């Protein structure tokens, strides 16, 4: 049955899953129409919300990772039942329109038990979509989503209500251009600012600058008036980093391992997205009183350093967590990214893929050959690319 929709501009009922396993075609139209929906609820509110709630199909499409007989792991599209999503007290069912790609998703897809304990599993640590209960936009990043809770690579998720942020973006897709990576970049920059970082102090260096976190950090810092030095091992991305606002691009050799416990201080502050030996060398080159926001581990989890940068130069090492922090802290940065901290160049360069393209793009993350932002759009299928 279809609720009369002349006023809100869209039909709010759904037929069963589209033939061929495609995504729900109405999802984006529904999100765009939400302001009109709320403006015209009036006496139709009960009927409209009942229609939205009943529109949740028993079955949906998801990209799920399955352990094979030989111990390997393989991802592919599956038809799943919503009844098998986690049963959570005060849980909220969300129809997902978009997700994003992150290194943690690639690890989960490869069968990394440090990220995901049980398989089959649906990755996707980010998701944006529609709260089926009340037809409001819903934004979820971090916590356990996509790790051991079925994630955004499925058309439906069910999560605790206190995981859900208010969507501040006009277009839901934009939230997934940033995703956890963009949120992390924003948190890194915010920590530097809280420690008193100012453009007048000198250059800020960003390691792993072509990655999902690094690109946002470069553009955001440049937008805030900082002189940004980008460090990347991808020489082909030099022009792209300059376009984002970097004033200088250095290769990885700028932070090659040295036996000296201290080096000439060059950088006022830093955002490190890779960890390991790179972070250890970076700490040796920070100016007195400077800070390093640390958020990554692709170069390694071990940090072999001395106390000298800390006790002789007063360097501050700032850990950044974007997963388990209180929702209010996430919301503060989301609101900034949707406002004064928006990164239009990053947004314009993002690409969109369908579930059938996830394999290749996640493999690129594991190989370190990815660059820029990738958005998963559930409405994209082989038939409508």
Image (cartoon, grey):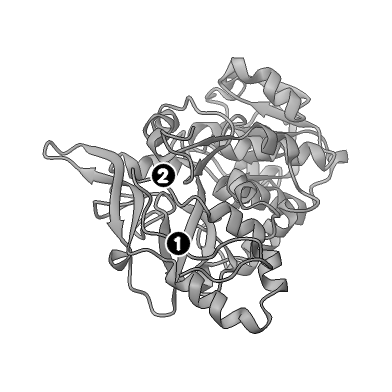
Could one spot residue 284 in this view of the protein?
no
- Which secondary structure, mark 1? loop
Question: Callout 2 environment at 10 Å: few (<14), some (14 to 19), or many (20+)?
Answer: many
- Which secondary structure, mark 2? helix
Q: Does residue 212 appear left or right of residue 304 in this picture?
A: right
Q: In this orientation, which residue lies closer to the viewer: 255 or 344?
A: 344
Marks 1 and 2 sit apart, C-alpha to C-alpha, by 30 Å
Percent across and percent down for residue 159 are 44, 68
Percent across and percent down for residue 142 are 49, 57
Q: Which of the two discs, 1 and 2, sits closer to the camera?
A: 1
Percent across and percent down for residue 353 are 49, 36
Q: Does residue 102 appear left or right of residue 262 in this picture?
A: left
Whether residues under marks 1 and 2 lie with C-beta atoms below 8 angstroms apart, the answer is: no
Residue that mark 2 sits on: 105
Residue that mark 1 sits on: 14
Q: Single out the residue that lies furthest toward the left.
A: 69
Asked where in the image residue 108 lies, by quadrant, the reply is top left
Could one spot residue 166 in this view of the protein?
yes
Q: In this orientation, which residue lies closer to the viewer: 176 or 287?
A: 176
For the N terminus, the image quarter is bottom left
Question: Callout 1 environment at 10 Å: few (<14), some (14 to 19), or many (20+)?
Answer: some
User: What residue is drawn where x is 49% and y is 72%?
Assistant: 51
Percent across and percent down for residue 89 are 39, 80
Q: Single out the residue that lies furthest toward the right.
A: 200
User: What residue is drawn where x is 61% and y is 67%?
Assistant: 5
The first of marks 1 and 2 along the sequence is 1
Circle number at residue 25 = none
Q: Is residue 35 above or below residue 66?
A: below
């Amino acid at each position: 049955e279809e609720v009369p929709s002349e006023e809100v501009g869209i039909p709010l009922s759904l037929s069963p899953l589209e033939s061929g396993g495609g995504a729900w075609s109405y999802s984006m139209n529904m999100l765009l129409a939400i302001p009109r929906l709320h403006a015209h609820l009036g006496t139709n509110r009960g009927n409209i919300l009942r229609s939205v709630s009943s529109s949740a199909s028993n079955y949906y499409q998801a990209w799920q990772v399955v352990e094979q007989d030989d111990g390997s792991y393989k991802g592919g599209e599956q038809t799943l039942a919503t009844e098998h999503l986690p049963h959570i007290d005060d849980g909220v069912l969300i129809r997902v329109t978009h997700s994003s790609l992150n290194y943690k998703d690639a690890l989960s897809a490869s069968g990394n038990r440090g990220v995901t304990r049980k398989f089959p599993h649906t990755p996707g640590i980010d998701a944006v979509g529609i709260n089926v209960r009340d037809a409001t936009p819903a934004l979820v990043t971090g916590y356990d989503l996509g790790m051991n809770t079925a994630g955004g690579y499925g058309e439906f998720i069910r999560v605790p209500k206190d995981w859900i942020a208010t969507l501040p973006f006009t277009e839901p897709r934009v939230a997934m251009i940033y995703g956890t990576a963009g949120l992390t970049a924003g948190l890194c920059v915010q920590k530097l600012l809280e420690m008193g970082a100012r453009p007048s102090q000198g250059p800020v260096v960003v390691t792993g600058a072509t990655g999902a976190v690094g690109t946002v950090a470069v553009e955001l810092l440049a937008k805030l008036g900082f002189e940004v030095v980008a460090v990347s091992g991808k020489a082909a991305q030099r022009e792209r980093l300059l376009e984002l606002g970097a004033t200088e691009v250095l290769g990885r050799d700028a932070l090659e391992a040295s036996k000296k416990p201290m080096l000439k201080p060059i950088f006022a502050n830093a955002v490190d997205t890779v960890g390991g030996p790179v972070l250890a060398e970076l700490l040796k080159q920070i100016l007195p009183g400077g800070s390093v926001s640390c958020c990554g581990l692709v170069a390694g989890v071990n940090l072999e350093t001395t106390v000298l940068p800390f006790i002789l130069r007063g360097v501050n090492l700032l850990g950044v967590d974007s997963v388990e922090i209180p929702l209010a802290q996430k919301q503060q940065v989301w609101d900034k990214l949707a406002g004064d901290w928006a990164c239009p160049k990053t947004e314009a360069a993002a690409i969109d893929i369908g579930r059938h393209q996830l394999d290749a793009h996640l493999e690129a993350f594991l190989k370190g050959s990815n660059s820029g932002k990738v958005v998963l759009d559930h409405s994209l299928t082989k038939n409508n690319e």
